[in-house]
Amino acid sequence: MRISQRASRIAPFYVMEMAKAASVLAQQARLTDKPMVFLNIGEPDFTAPPLVQQAAVKAINDGRTQYTHALGLDPLRERISDWYATRFGVTVPARRIVVTAGASAALQLACLALVEAGDEVLMPDPCYPCNRQFVQAADGRAVLLPTNAAQRFQLSADQVASHWQARTRGVLLASPSNPTGTSIAFEELKLIHQIVSDKGGITMVDEIYLGLSYDDAFGQTALAIEDNIISINSFSKYFNMTGWRLGWLVVPDALVPVIERLAQNLFICASTVAQHAALACFEPDSLAIYEERRAAFKQRRDHFIPQLNAMGLTVPVMPDGAFYAWADCRAACDKLGLADSWAFAEHVMHKAHVALTPGRDFSEHAPGDFVRMSTASSLSSLDTAAQRLRQLLELA
């Protein structure tokens, strides 16, 4: 069977490969006094709040499971619009909001609508690997530009200007970012967008962790800059609905019919039950729960990352959002006699029964230097992981 070149260009998602290996080992670890601690998957340990669950059950019981409009339920689009106004003080008309089958579908729709074969899209290194695969699936090319701690592992306006080439179509950014949990300073983002606009390009910003911002200096949506920015968002992270596969896309008015046409053909619509359930996300009781959970995620960050720093797994930039620790493991690798982050993650998984994610997925320029740890787990799980890592390094 001949496999398409497009499919062949898509690299494996090593996060999932490591997760499979950890799951197999976890079956054996259950028989010991050291069960596996999973810090490898970026998923909240909270489920959808009660009102959201109840709304899903009611939708099923009431038989409201038919296809919706390809752009999504109008009441849900209105509630998302209201959330932008109340949470961020930004006017985002519901007509510009497209409800999608997760943020993944939103990214795919945006790339298919805007990226031609051979177009290049500038992205930071490190970055979330699937984002660049959406560019490649549209026959474009993701161009990863190395970043460092001094720039919060985000692109700078100077980088965008100096690397803009004839085939450059635009930028795809993430703020807050996976794997670093860092955001782009608002003024820097404005400068980047100005450069992109002057070149006739597109600015796409993955904002799926925006609700989980912990610093007012960064917790603003890119949509506050102007209407031509394309924002991707999701119900997975802040709204704790990962497996419900529901997200949204905010686009300029002129792009709405284009996205609608693509969505009609590729997805028909997002899950109807998930959409009815998501209406309850914006009830005051649900929003209060989400804010309590946001505070809990911040507490976990503040509790865990200093422990990593103290044992030499240095997190060079304190995350201002999301729930990740992007930890430099080079000193630990040297101490343990290991080659890189992949060997370190495997060693930790087998010896300490802690599952981490090596940097191979996220970085092309320094794939062996860092590991990503999710801080979405409970404080007790994080403490257990820290204790095991500490013991492993102290015994080396």
Image (cartoon, rainbow, N blue to C red):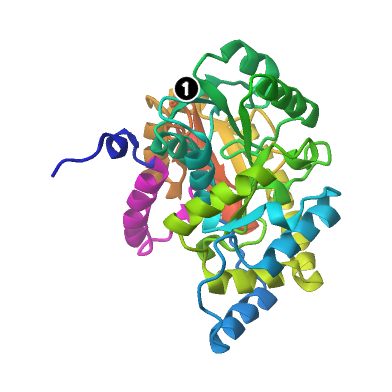
**Residue shown at 58% from the left, 61% from the top:** 45
Closer to the camera in the image, 390 or 76 = 76
Query: Which residues fall within the magenta stretch?
Result: 14-41
In magenta stretch: residue 233: no
Quadrant in the picture for the N terminus: top left
Closer to the camera in the image, 258 or 120 = 258
**Residue shown at 51% from the left, 47% from the top:** 109
Q: Which quarter of the picture shows residue 196?
A: top right
In this image, 159 relative to 143: left or right?
A: right
Instruction: Identify residue for label 1.
Output: 366
Whether residue 259 is situated above or below residue 67 in the rendered picture: above
Closer to the camera in the image, 240 or 115 = 115
**Residue shown at 73% from the left, 57% from the top:** 94
Q: Position of residue 12 (x, y in %)?
A: 34, 40
Of all residues, the one furthest to the top in this rendering is: 162
Of all residues, the one furthest to the left in this rendering is: 1
Residue type for callout 1: Ala
Q: Position of residue 195 (x, y in %)?
A: 69, 20
Total tally of numbered discs in the picture:
1
In this image, 390 relative to 117: left or right?
A: right
